[in-house]
Image: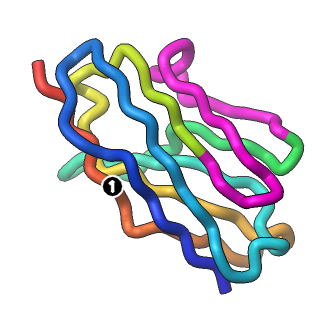
Amino acid sequence: QVQLVESGGGLVQAGGSLRLSCVASGTISSIGVMGWYRQAPGKQRELVASISRLGKTNYVDLVKGRFTISRDNPKSTVHLQMNSLKPEDTAVYYCNAQGLNIAMNYWGQGTQVTVSS
C-alpha cells in the first residue's frame, strides 16, 4: 500500500511561481515512475511531468522550459517547480506513482493551483 500527499498549491498571479511537493509513504520500495497530472473542470486529466527512479524526465510540451520535476528517490518525494505560470495552468494537480510491476497506480488527493490574470 502506498499513500501520496501533495502540498504547495495556492493562488498566484500570472508569471509567478509555485513549488508542489508530494511525499510517498507505505510500501515505497514498490514505486517506480512518479509524476504530476492536472485536471481542470470539464477537461480530461493530463500528464504534466514524470520522472523515473533513475531521474529520466518527461514533460508535456506546454510546460517545457517552465516546469521542472525532481525526485528525492530514497525518500520517495517528488517536486514540481512551476515558473512563469499562466492562467491556462489553473487546475487540480495530482501526484501519481506507478508500481514497479506497473500493476498498480497510486494517486494523491490533489492540490489546487489557481493562476490569475
Residue 107, position in %: x, y? 51, 68
Q: Residue at x 20, y 51 (%)?
A: 42
Q: Residue 106's quadrant in the figure? A: bottom right
Residue 85, position in %: x, y? 32, 21
Q: Residue at x 74, y 54 (%)?
A: 33
- Left/right placement of residue 107 relative to residue 40 reads right
Q: Residue at x 30, y 31 (%)?
A: 89
As for residue 65 lying within the magenta part, the answer is yes
Closer to us: 111 or 61? 111
Q: Residue 30's quadrant in the figure? A: bottom right
**Quick check: 79 above or below 103?**
above
Q: Residue 51's quadrant in the figure? A: top right
Residue 37, position in %: x, y? 47, 49
Q: Which residue is mark 1?
A: 111
**Quick check: 68 above or below 113?**
above
**Quick check: 105 above or below 37?**
below
- Left/right placement of residue 78 relative to residue 74 reads left
As for residue 61 lying within the magenta part, the answer is yes
Highlighted magenta segment, given as a residue range = 55-78
Residue 111, position in %: x, y? 33, 55
> Which quarter of the figure is the N terminus placed in?
bottom right
In this picture the colour scheme is rainbow
Q: Residue most toward the front? A: 75
> Which quarter of the figure is the C terminus placed in?
top left
User: Crowding near pointer 1: few (<14 within 10 Å), some, many (20+)?
Assistant: many
